[in-house]
Amino acid sequence: MYLKATISVSCSGLEMQDIDVRLRAKAIRQDDFRVICAILLTKGLLSRADGGEALRLYDVAARCEEELSEYLTYAFPVVLTNASRPPHFRLVPSRHRDYGLTDPEDDLESRREIRQSVFQALAVALLALRMLYDEQLLEKKIDSAGRITVKLTDLALFMNTTFGVGLPSTKMDQRALFMKLKKHGAVDVRIDALNDEDAVVVIRPEILTLVLDQNVRAAENSFKYAHGIEDPVADATEHPEITASVQSAQIIALERPERTPPGRS
């Protein structure tokens, strides 16, 4: 048992030594590498479109993507994804779960990070935001950064009429919901302005990598079936790809076990 533990620690040390050598060869500072890891582990998103320091760190991350992926996937049950449109890195939980690691959703429930009403509204809000984004994109109501602005009241109405699920009833839960959406790069919104009836929500283009096309198709099909618009048996026979999309479509999981960022004891 002691020998096994020693080998494991030694391999970890060799792995980091190799990454450190490669970072120095690319003239990448260890401090920048640590900051990028900390941002990805705590926020889950590093977007070039945020400008300023985020732009600089994104460009650094692009130069050491291989080293970032090796370190993060070695140390944590996560996968690093890199999207070019819009350019951003996202860290998502891996499907592989090691023994002793709690599933993110079970962990969320046991620790009660957010109330059940917020958890239920989160997936619906993401779907609604993606569908509103697509709708406004067709009408070319988009700014130079690829962002789209909608009123909070319009989002709430769309969620209600399309999915039968509204925003959380209490202001505290609404704040928690939008803090989650904002944290993971789906929206920009002034949290302190949510009480204003004219409050606006800016939908970021990163919503395209959070909610995929098959998620939207699955939601639309489920809505039609629930309202008897189409015959699900006939559709499954004539269009088996519909059934497959409903079964396989999964919104990227946003919750992950809390970890101590690299470089902190």
Image: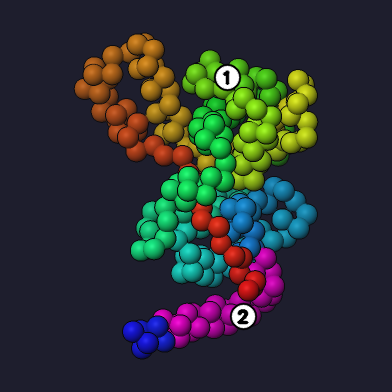
In the figure, is residue 67 to the left or right of 221?
right
| Residue nearest the viewer, comparing 12 with 60 | 12
Q: Is residue 69 visible?
A: yes
Task: Inspect the image, locate mark 1, and give the three-letter code of the amino acid beneath it.
Answer: Phe
Residue 4: percent from left, percent from top: 35, 84
Mark 1 secondary-structure assignment: helix
Check the image and report above or below for 226 versus 82. above
In the figure, is residue 16 to the left or right of 169?
left
In which quadrant is the N terminus drawn?
bottom left
| Residue nearest the viewer, comparing 92 with 8 | 8
- For the stretch drawn in magenta, what is the main secondary structure? helix
| Residue nearest the viewer, comparing 188 with 179 | 179
The residue positioned 69% from the left and 69% from the top of the image is 32
The boundaries of the magenta stretch are 7-35
In which quadrant is the C terminus drawn?
bottom right
In the figure, is residue 61 to the left or right of 6?
right
- The residue lying furthest to the left in this view is 237
Quarter of the image holding residue 140? Answer: top right
Q: Which mark is residue 25?
A: 2
Mark 2 secondary-structure assignment: helix
Check the image and report above or below for 114 versus 132. below
Q: Which mark is residue 158?
A: 1
Residue 85: percent from left, percent from top: 58, 45
Residue 58: percent from left, percent from top: 66, 58
Check the image and report above or below for 153 versus 36. above
Q: Is residue 28 magenta?
A: yes
In the figure, is residue 6 to the left or right of 23?
left
Q: Is residue 159 magenta?
A: no
Check the image and report above or below for 135 versus 26. above
